[in-house]
Image (cartoon, grey):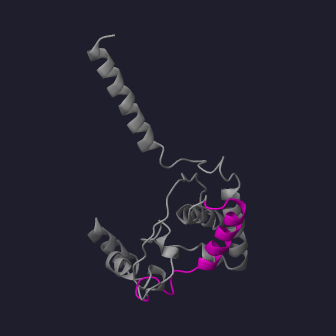
């Protein structure tokens, strides 16, 4: 085999590996082997919360959909969820996610990310409120930083009406 052909084949294989790595990040059924009941446990937790308070299904955009919105304030730093101007008291349901996470940790320690729990819970809430169900690709990693300053700078306050929200998000691009 010539060096040129070997070089071409090597380049092609590397390109395929890069494409595979890039597209394999999030996938439907991500926890099928590592924690097969993950999505079911989330749905059960959301359903129980929805039965007690169907307002828990309401949602709004969050910077912390990587899971950082679940982090508590620490070392004098105010976390997103405690930011009075951006999330508190409009963002709620932390106890639901905490309960779901505790159940999953007991079953599959260190496997299911809080970011994926939020994504599954959002999907399940929409469905329970009468919306269309859909598949959720999973495999997100949790954020490790939660900052009220970031949420104040990037999220509109919960008091805005639809027109004001549309303008605020249009300004963000």
Q: How far across and how far down the image is residue 62, in percent?
A: 45, 72
Residue at image x 71%, y 67%?
103
Q: Which residue is drawn at 61% across and 61% down?
A: 110
Q: In which quarter of the image is residue 6?
A: top left
Q: Residue at coordinates 35% horizontally, 21% vertically from top-left?
A: 9
Does the magenta portion include 44?
no
Specify the quadrant that holds the C terminus. bottom left
Can you name the residue that lies furthest to the top here? Answer: 1
Asked whether 107 falls inside the magenta stretch, the response is yes
Residue 71 rendering spot, x and y as whole percentages: 50, 76
* Viewport quadrant of the N terminus: top left
- Quarter of the figure with residue 45: bottom right
Residue 126, relative to residue 168: is it above or below? above
Tell me: 58 left or right of 100. left
Q: Is residue 95 above or below residue 129?
A: below
Relative placement, left or right, of 13 versus 125 is left
* Most foreground residue, 105 or 38: 105
Q: Is residue 60 above or below residue 15?
A: below
- Range of the magenta residues? 84-110
Please give the name of the residue rendered at 53% of the width and 53% of the height, measured from the top-left corner: 139
Q: How many labels does the image show?
A: 0
Residue 50: x and y in percent read: 68, 73
Q: Where is residue 34 in the image (x, y as percent from the top left)?
A: 65, 50
Q: Quadrant of residue 98?
A: bottom right
Q: Is residue 11 left or right of residue 112?
A: left
């Amino acid at each position: 085999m010539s060096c040129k052909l070997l070089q071409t084949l090597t380049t092609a294989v590397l390109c395929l590996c890069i494409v595979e790595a890039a597209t394999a990040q999030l996938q439907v059924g991500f926890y099928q082997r590592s924690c097969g009941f993950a999505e079911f446990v989330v749905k059960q937790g959301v359903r129980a919360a929805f039965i007690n308070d169907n307002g828990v299904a309401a949602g709004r955009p969050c910077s912390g959909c990587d899971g950082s919105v679940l982090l508590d304030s620490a070392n004098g730093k105010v976390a997103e969820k405690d930011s009075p101007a951006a999330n508190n008291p409009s963002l709620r349901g932390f106890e639901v996610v905490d309960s779901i996470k505790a159940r999953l940790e007991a079953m599959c320690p260190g496997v299911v990310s809080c970011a994926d729990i939020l994504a599954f819970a959002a999907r399940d809430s929409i469905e329970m409120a009468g919306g269309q169900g859909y598949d959720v690709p999973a495999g997100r990693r949790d954020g490790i930083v939660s900052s009220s300053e970031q949420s104040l700078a990037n999220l509109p306050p919960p008091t805005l009406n639809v027109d004001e929200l549309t303008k605020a998000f249009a300004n963000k691009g």
